[in-house]
């Protein structure tokens, strides 16, 4: 079957190449069009590009094998592209969207965590505490919650955080 003077196999191959290049460009410059498709997931550029790429790849293979008439190859390629794009959306894009990729922390999120004193905290003074998080180690200025002195290498509980200063208490793990 020919369309616009070209064989369907050539059309599928050209569409596959351009859709692959568009996918590469979208990977590099996708942040510029990130808001598109937020309302309806079917208009997400990643889903559309994956559908076009997968449909043209399936169509090219089916045309190359020439097992069925060209009309059936187009229908089968469309169905294959739709199914694989839906699977791509459900099993790749949805989990990626819901994944927490932020390595940042807020001062409020430090409350209730445990830390180690790396610079002794004098009474009515400041020392330094290191907190181990998923993104690495955080060291912050600290003072005793009740203005008590806390020695080096003591495990402390962060009671509250005000203006970048941790208010801590000594923490002893008690077994029942």
Image (cartoon, helix red, strand yellow):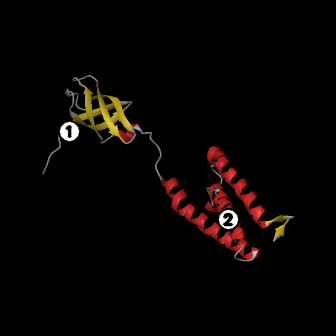
Between discs 2 and 1, the one toward the N terminus: 2
Count up the numbered dots: 2
Which corner quadrant holds the N terminus? bottom right
SS at badge 2: helix
Which residue is depicted at the point 51% across and 54% down? 96
For the question of whether residue 146 can be seen, the reply is yes
Q: Position of residue 56 (x, y in %)?
A: 70, 63
Which residue is depicted at the point 29% across and 30% down? 129
Q: Position of residue 119 (x, y in %)?
A: 26, 24
Q: Position of residue 50 (x, y in %)?
A: 64, 59
Which residue is depicted at the point 65% across and 44% down? 29
* In the depicted structure, whether residue 81 falls above or below residue 67: above
Q: Is residue 43 left or right of residue 160?
A: right
- Other residues around mark 2 within 10 Å, as few (<14) / some (14–19) / many (≥20): many
Query: Of the numbered discs in the image, which one, if any, rests on residue 143?
Result: none
Q: Is residue 66 left or right of residue 120?
A: right
Q: Residue 165 occupies which quadrant of the picture?
A: top left
Query: Of the numbered discs in the image, which one, if any, rests on residue 171?
Result: 1
Q: Position of residue 149 (x, y in %)?
A: 20, 26
SS at badge 1: loop
Q: Residue 68 occupies which quadrant of the picture?
A: bottom right
Query: Of the numbered discs in the image, which one, if any, rests on residue 55?
Result: 2
């Amino acid at each position: 079957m020919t369309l616009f003077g070209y064989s369907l196999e050539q059309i599928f191959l050209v569409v596959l190449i351009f859709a692959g290049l568009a996918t590469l460009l979208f990977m590099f410059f996708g942040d510029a069009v990130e808001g598109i498709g937020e309302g309806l997931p079917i208009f997400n550029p990643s889903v559309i590009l994956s559908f076009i790429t997968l449909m043209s790849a399936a169509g090219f293979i089916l045309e190359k094998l020439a097992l069925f008439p060209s009309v059936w190859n187009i229908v089968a390629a469309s169905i294959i592209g739709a199914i694989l794009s839906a699977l791509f959306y459900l099993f790749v894009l949805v989990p990626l969207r819901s994944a927490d990729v932020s390595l940042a922390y807020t001062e409020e999120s430090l409350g209730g965590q445990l830390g180690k004193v790396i610079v002794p905290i004098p009474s009515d003074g400041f020392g330094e505490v290191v907190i181990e998080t998923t993104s690495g180690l955080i060291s912050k200025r600290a003072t005793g919650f009740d203005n008590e002195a806390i020695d080096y290498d003591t495990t402390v509980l962060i009671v509250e955080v005000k203006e970048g200063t941790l208010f801590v208490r000594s923490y002893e793990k008690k077994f029942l």
